[in-house]
Amino acid sequence: MALSSVASAQPDSTASAVGKAVYQHAPLTPRGLLERAFAFAFRGLVYAQIWEDPLVDMDALEIGPDSDVITIASGGCNMLSYLTARPNSVTAVDLNTAHVALGKLKLAAAQHLPDYGAFHRFFAQTGQQDNVTAYRTHVAPHLDEVTRRYWEGRDLSGRRRISAFTRNFYTNGLLGHFIGGAHLIARIYRIDPREMLAAQSLEEQREIFETRMAPIFDKKFIRWLTQQPASLFGLGIPPAQYEALCEGDAQGMNAVLRQRLEKLACDFDIRQNYFAWQAFGRGYGDAPRASLPPYLEEAHHQTVREGVARARILHCNFAKHLRALPEGALDRYVLLDAQDWMTDAQMTDLWQQITRTARPGARVIFRTAARPTLLPGRLPDALLGQWHYEAERSDEGTRRDRSAIYGGFHLYVLKGD
């Protein structure tokens, strides 16, 4: 899930930048009102955790020691997870100031917290009162003023934002609140999503889904709710992406969401899927049962710690940053699902900059709400013709993506020697 645009001309406030990325219709039209409501919802923290599977990403990107990666930051997890592959550099960009602050916090914590135990407590455990002390002692001195002011500022409840790490950080943000709301609705129907976490096999997972979770999609209220685009803002689904998901038929959204939840619940061993733990348990669980993103695994901690020196996160627009780079500067591009939000002109501008800055053999990955790749027919043939679509690898990535949110994963490789 991502927010990037080609419209921003300078570093903006999050509200202004999101608006430039999302607005495609006049303010007083029904679609225009929805777009502005979505932009309003995106003003603060949206994703405490990124929802693209880094194992799928790294397999498709084939990151090596000479790789220079650029990605949209979102929750920052994948930026750090890519460091486990030891690339030459990783640059993350984002328009959301909260995401930038979270990414900088993660980078500083990986480098300056005293050991893996402290890092794990900070980002993987709940109810850790010592995390604020760890922040003040080891992390805060290494943050820039803007980032430090963000974390030491107060949220709408009056608490300092950094205190979220003494509770359960992953219940925060727009998506965290959405998952909390989904749990509340489930309990109204006498369903506890945490039941899924006790399953000992794929067969048990399937049984729990079919008997406990699937029937909720037949409820009249749920069918009505899923037809309201605003009800899915918490999933990071703007109006344009909502229409792509249900192919313009709002009644079809119920079936789409059921299918995505079924994949999350049934297609992967729950013990190896931290996305499912977040969705059904609102956290990473307790060791040794916990499933973790690569950057939080103990085996990768030293590699991540050393790799922080080769990583950076910037508050800027993806295409604008590329325009400032020389030809051949990069060879790995991660667009998340940002193109689902773009007009044809924005996508063309983005891919012109990608092609200009790409080295031979460069790789681009992205995800889409619907299954097909969205580039044919929307990019000029001469531009798209410089890239080869890896159909089999894309199908494999779609099947293997444990987050189960997206309809399609896509890999393009620049032609030439």
Image (spheres, rainbow, N blue to C red):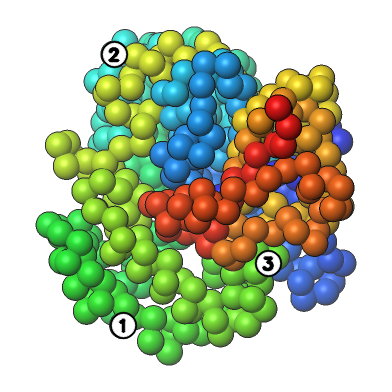
Q: Amino acid at mark 3?
A: Pro
- 346 is higher (above) or lower (below) than 321: below
Q: Position of residue 162 (x, y in %)?
A: 44, 30
Res 207 visible: yes
Is 199 left, or right, of 228 in this rendering?
A: left
Res 236 visible: no
Q: Which sits earlier in the primary sequence, circle 2 or circle 3?
A: 2
Quarter containing the C terminus: top right
| C-alpha gap between disc 1 and disc 3 | 27 Å
- 15 is higher (above) or lower (below) than 126: below
* Secondary structure under the numbered disc 3 in the rendered image: helix
- 36 is higher (above) or lower (below) than 74: below
Q: Position of residue 30 (x, y in %)?
A: 77, 76
Name the residue at 41% across, 23% down.
84
Q: Nearer the viewer, residue 230 or 254?
A: 254
Q: Amino acid at mark 2?
A: Asp
Q: Which sits earlier in the primary sequence, circle 1 or circle 2?
A: 2
Name the residue at 65% across, 58% down.
373
The residue that label 1 is drawn on is 215
Mark 3 neighbour density, 10 Å: few (under 14) some (14–19) many (20 or more): many
Mark 1 neighbour density, 10 Å: few (under 14) some (14–19) many (20 or more): few
* Secondary structure under the numbered disc 1 in the rendered image: helix
The residue that label 2 is drawn on is 115
Q: Quadrant of residue 216?
A: bottom left
Name the residue at 54% across, 24% down.
104
* Secondary structure under the numbered disc 2 in the rendered image: loop
